[in-house]
Image (cartoon, rainbow, N blue to C red):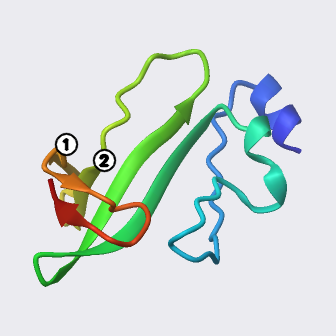
Amino acid sequence: MVGALIRLGVTVLMTAELTESYTELRLSPHGISFLTDGIILQRYAEMDGELKRVMVVAKMRGFDHHKQLRLYEIEEQGLVVGAPLSDYAGIMVGEPHRK
């Protein structure tokens, strides 16, 4: 079905919820990430005593893209993406700390 939609010029957006430990970073269930053109990882992280939303473009086939982690918020106007989190490390493994 996905192939048929793509041939019609439709952009297909799929989501997958991953159940994982923070020490293991998997991009997709069942090892299917090689089939996708783009992967955007989203996760929650505790930072400065608050629960924050973090995202990163992990893969974008055929395009050079930024790979920085960024905070994001979902507001009435839509998605608001913040500046790169260049002053933190360990976010993706569940141990965020300032560099």
Residue drawn at x 19%, y 42% as measured from the top left = 84
Q: Position of residue 9 (x, y in %)?
A: 70, 24
Q: Nearer the viewer, residue 91 or 14?
A: 91
Q: Nearer the viewer, residue 89 or 78?
A: 89
Quarter of the image for residue 52 reads bottom left
Which circle's residue, 1 or 2, is located before the other in the chain? 2
Residue drawn at x 10%, y 76% as measured from the top left = 48
Q: Position of residue 5 (x, y in %)?
A: 79, 36
Identity of the amino acid at label 2?
Answer: Leu
**Label 2 SS:** loop
Q: Nearer the viewer, residue 45 or 16?
A: 45
Could you tell me which quadrant the N terminus lies in?
top right
Q: Residues within 10 Å of mark 2 (few under 14, many from 20)?
A: many
**Label 1 SS:** strand
Q: Is residue 64 above or below residue 29?
A: above
Identity of the amino acid at label 1?
Answer: Pro
Q: Residues within 10 Å of mark 1 (few under 14, many from 20)?
A: some
Q: Position of residue 60 (x, y in %)?
A: 55, 29
Residue extending farthest to the bottom is 49
Residue drawn at x 14%, y 53% as measured from the top left = 99
Distance from Cα at disc 1 to Cα at disc 2? 6 Å
Horizontal side of 96 relative to 67 (left or right) equals left
Label ID, residue 84: 1
**Circle 2 residue:** 69
Horizontal side of 84 relative to 22 (left or right) equals left
Quarter of the image for residue 6 reads top right
Residue drawn at x 41%, y 60% as measured from the top left = 92
